[in-house]
């Protein structure tokens, strides 16, 4: 099964290399790598181009935001499986996609999802938070649950049938997608309880109270535009779930000798 | 990922006589492919060295101090990190046939997503050892060791669950917590998740490593082959070992959480 990995990027010369390297280092898997740039002028384009034809498809033109760019990537993809990786994020190891493909081969499912680590921006070995997705039950959506979209791998036909990101939403576009695909249309998902994706801290929907409030309004919209009705507590629990992700004393690798961090 | 050697083996001894490890050493040295055996001696004296066979594949390392179980294995693993494809961590009280190891490695060759493989483990009598475990909770560890017999009967189901006794030990399965008595490890995976955490002097270092591998790769139980483990369960007899066990338990729960450990909840919940 061919995997199309899509990275949308805008002006991220600092970290895009890590993302690209982690995709290109994937073993035992056929990959089509699509990078969609929003017209960066900070050296991102040069960095991407330096990888030559290892990047299957690359476009750079001004666009209307990250989810718009990902949609563009999805429409260009030819692989059976679609993976979405942001330019800040990277795969935990070179056997991530081969494990995803194995799950698709062994399980009857439309999509596979896993966990992710939020890591310290300066030191990716330091875990700031973890997102333990948990096994899917329909009622979990009423508690504000969703799988993280960078750790969500789905068959391309799912997007063809039910559409990709709704770009009328800003911070809740990923939430709306999960709600529409899994909750509304009931695609079959398989959970791999492993940490496949490392995400640098500082996402679009976090931070200030005002942003939190805006995000909350958007989250509600995600339900209503799908003609779904959340429970009265859903919107209260959704931000609370995040609180349980915090961990303060966990490193990816034990530190017992300086050499162990070099690799 | 260069691999001049197919398999490296590390054996950590502490005041063991040569007789007690002779069969194991013999099996490893007669393996039908390129291999290397490290004997890491944590004992106060190196009297073992003179008795060992002189073979180029065998390297004896006398530490001069007790580095602990994980620390001593790490000493060997660091040496082979860029040479070996697979690494076997094995206890001195294990007996196995070379053929079993060959079969396990063939299986790993065919299954690139597996990072750690453990075979079926039997007592000398042929009885099965339940070494496939869940991630421990403080309650599990305390109960196993300290709860008096009459209460134990009532809580036996919890203990059984912890040792996955309700699962079929004749079937392959992915197990989060595999025993350190016989760990066949993929070296490329060790490079990613790191080696043993040396903060654990003894006990639970295997749980910790197994957990870190399980976080990213598959940790499989492979009952197609079996080995024999003359189980000592030392911490039930020697007080000092009990102290090590308790210290390690504190370090483990400080590391991953005592009562709130979402990864444990998710993975254990799925196996119960």
Image: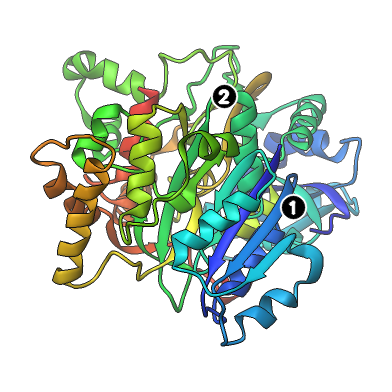
Q: Which of B184 and A222 is in front in this view?
A: A222
Residue under the point 60% across and 48% down: A96
Q: Which of A144 and B5 is in front in this view?
A: A144
Say if residue B239 shows up in the picture: no
Image coordinates of residue B190 in percent, x first then y, are 63, 54
**Residue matched to label 1:** B38
Q: In this view, does B116 lie to the left or right of A191?
A: right
Question: Going by the picture, which residue comes out furthest to the bottom?
Answer: A42
Q: In which quarter of the image is the C terminus of chain A?
A: bottom right
Residue under the point 73% across and 76% down: A49
Q: Is residue B212 left or right of residue B224?
A: left
Instruction: State whether residue B8 is above or below residue A121.
Output: above
Image coordinates of residue B96 in percent, x first then y, are 72, 27
Q: Is residue A29 left or right of residue B159?
A: right
Q: Are marks 1 and 2 on the same chain?
A: no
Residue under the point 17% across and 15% down: B150
Q: In this view, does B23 lie to the left or right of B269?
A: right
Question: Going by the picture, which residue comes out furthest to the left?
Answer: A232
Instruction: State which chain disc 2 sits on.
Output: A
Where on the picture, by quarter, is residue A228? top left
Say if residue A99 shows up in the picture: yes
* Other-residue count near label 1 (Cα within 10 Å), few / some / many at <14 / 14–19 / ≥20: many
Q: Which of B148 and B160 is in front in this view?
A: B160
**Residue matched to label 2:** A107
* Other-residue count near label 2 (Cα within 10 Å), few / some / many at <14 / 14–19 / ≥20: some
Q: How far is mark 1 from mark 2, CA to CA? A: 41 Å
Instruction: State which chain disc 1 sits on.
Output: B
Q: How many marks?
A: 2
Image coordinates of residue B126 in percent, x first then y, are 60, 12
Kind of element beneath mark 2: loop
Image coordinates of residue B79 in percent, x first then y, are 73, 63
């Amino acid at each position: 099964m061919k995997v199309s990995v899509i990275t949308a990027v805008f002006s991220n010369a600092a970290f895009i290399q890590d993302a690209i390297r982690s995709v290109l280092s994937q073993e035992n898997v056929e990959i089509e790598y699509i990078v969609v740039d929003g017209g960066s002028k900070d050296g991102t384009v040069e960095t991407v181009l330096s990888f030559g034809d290892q990047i299957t498809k690359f476009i750079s033109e001004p666009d209307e935001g990250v989810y718009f760019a990902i949609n563009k990537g999805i429409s260009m993809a030819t692989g059976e499986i679609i993976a979405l990786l942001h330019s800040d994020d990277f795969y935990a190891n070179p056997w991530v996609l081969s494990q995803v493909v194995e799950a698709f081969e062994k399980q009857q499912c439309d999509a596979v999802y896993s966990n992710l680590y939020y890591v310290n921006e300066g030191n990716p070995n330091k875990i700031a938070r973890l997102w333990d997705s948990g096994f899917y039950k329909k009622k979990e959506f009423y508690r504000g649950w969703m799988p993280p979209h960078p750790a969500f791998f789905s068959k391309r036909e799912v997007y063809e049938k039910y559409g990709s990101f709704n770009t009328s939403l800003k911070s809740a576009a990923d939430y709306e997608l999960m709600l529409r695909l899994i909750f509304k249309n009931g695609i079959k998902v398989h959970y791999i309880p492993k940490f496949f994706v490392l995400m640098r801290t500082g996402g679009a929907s976090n931070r200030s109270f005002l942003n939190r409030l805006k995000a909350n309004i958007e989250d509600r919209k995600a339900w209503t535009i799908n003609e779904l009705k959340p429970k009265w507590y859903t919107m209260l629990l959704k931000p609370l779930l995040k609180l349980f992700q915090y961990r303060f004393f966990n490193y990816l690798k034990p530190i017992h000798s300086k050499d162990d961090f070099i690799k | 990922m260069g691999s001049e050697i197919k398999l490296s083996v590390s054996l950590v001894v502490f005041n063991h006589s040569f007789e007690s490890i002779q069969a194991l050493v013999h099996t490893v040295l007669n393996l039908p492919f390129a291999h290397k055996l490290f004997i890491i001696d944590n004992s106060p004296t190196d009297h073992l060295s003179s008795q060992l066979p002189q073979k180029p594949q065998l390297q004896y390392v006398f530490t001069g101090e007790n580095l602990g179980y994980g620390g001593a294995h790490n000493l060997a693993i660091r040496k082979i990190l860029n040479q070996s494809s697979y690494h076997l961590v094995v206890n001195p009280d294990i007996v196995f046939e070379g053929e079993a190891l060959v079969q396990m490695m063939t299986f790993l060759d065919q299954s690139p997503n597996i990072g750690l493989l453990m075979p079926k483990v039997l007592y000398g009598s042929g009885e099965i050892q339940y070494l496939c475990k869940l991630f421990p909770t403080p309650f599990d560890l305390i109960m196993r060791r300290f709860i008096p017999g009459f209460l134990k009967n009532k809580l036996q189901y919890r203990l059984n669950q912890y040792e996955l006794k309700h699962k079929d030990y004749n079937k392959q399965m992915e197990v989060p917590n595999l025993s350190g008595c016989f760990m066949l490890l993929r070296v490329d995976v060790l490079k990613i998740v790191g080696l043993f955490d040396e903060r654990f002097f003894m006990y639970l270092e295997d749980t910790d490593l197994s957990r870190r591998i399980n976080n990213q790769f598959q940790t499989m139980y492979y009952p197609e082959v079996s080995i024999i483990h003359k189980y000592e369960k030392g911490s039930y007899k020697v007080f000092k070992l009990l102290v090590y066990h308790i210290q390690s338990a504190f370090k483990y729960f400080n590391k991953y959480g005592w009562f709130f450990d979402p990864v444990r909840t998710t993975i254990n919940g799925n196996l119960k």
